[in-house]
Image (cartoon, helix red, strand yellow):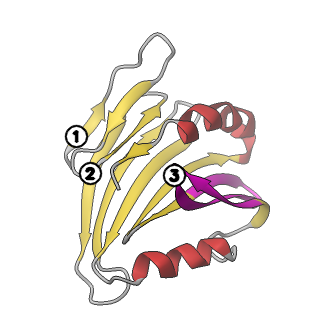
Amino acid sequence: MHRSGVGQPDSTGWTDANSTEGKFSVRLPGPFDDFTVKNSDEGLEAGQFFVIRSVTPEGVRLSVTRASYDNPGSAEHYFNNWQTGGALRGKEEGHRVTKYRGFDAVEISASDDSSLIYARTILVKRNLLLQTIESPLSQRAAAEQLKATFFQSLSFEP
């Protein structure tokens, strides 16, 4: 863990969250944690995962993960899972293949009996950047209000 519970909201209620090692930043609606996980398996999952996450008082979880894979084909493999809709549980509510800052991206929303997720994954060379908002169904309106600022504020180094 690099940092825990850091970040002071500005006058808009949002804070700038910069990853210590992941070369990305995003706006979050409150304090955040910043950490790195290394997976030394020899399979497709091997690599480093740089994470920034935050949880609102209503229980809405926002996170950005940069997955930097050791295996050259891993990022594309997992990105293809997102393109085909095979990456999420629950009922898909929306699915869009698009671009973000010139890179291929997929935006998905899904829900089950108790929760919902809004997600975007971006293929950046041998990396995947994954933005998620996860929420109890009862907090759908709160999660909806966070989407625009959170998803539009991501910046990263390729």
Residue ID for mark 2: 35
Say the numbered circle drawn on residue 3.
1
Question: Which residue range is magenta in the image?
Answer: 95-120
SS class, disc 3: strand
Residue at 22%, 45% (x, y): give it: 20
Question: Magenta part mainly helix, strand or loop?
Answer: strand
Q: Amino acid at mark 3?
A: Gln
Q: Is residue 133 at all visible to an observer of this figure?
A: yes
Whether residues under marks 1 and 2 lie with C-beta atoms below 8 angstroms apart, the answer is: yes
Residue assigned mark 3? 131
Does 152 appear above or below 73? Answer: above
Q: Earlier in the sequence, mark 1 or mark 2?
A: 1
- Residue 31 visible to an observer of this rendering: no
Which label was assigned to residue 52?
Answer: none
Mark 3 surroundings: few (<14), some (14-19) or many (≥20) residues within 10 A? many
Front disc: 2 or 3: 3
Name the image quarter holding residue 17: top left
- Residue at image position (65%, 72%) is 83
> Residue 154's spot in the image, x, y percent?
46, 42
Q: Note whether 47 is above or below 19 in the view shown.
A: below
Q: CA distance from mark 3 to mark 1?
A: 19 Å
- Give the side of residue 132 with respect to residue 69, left or right: right
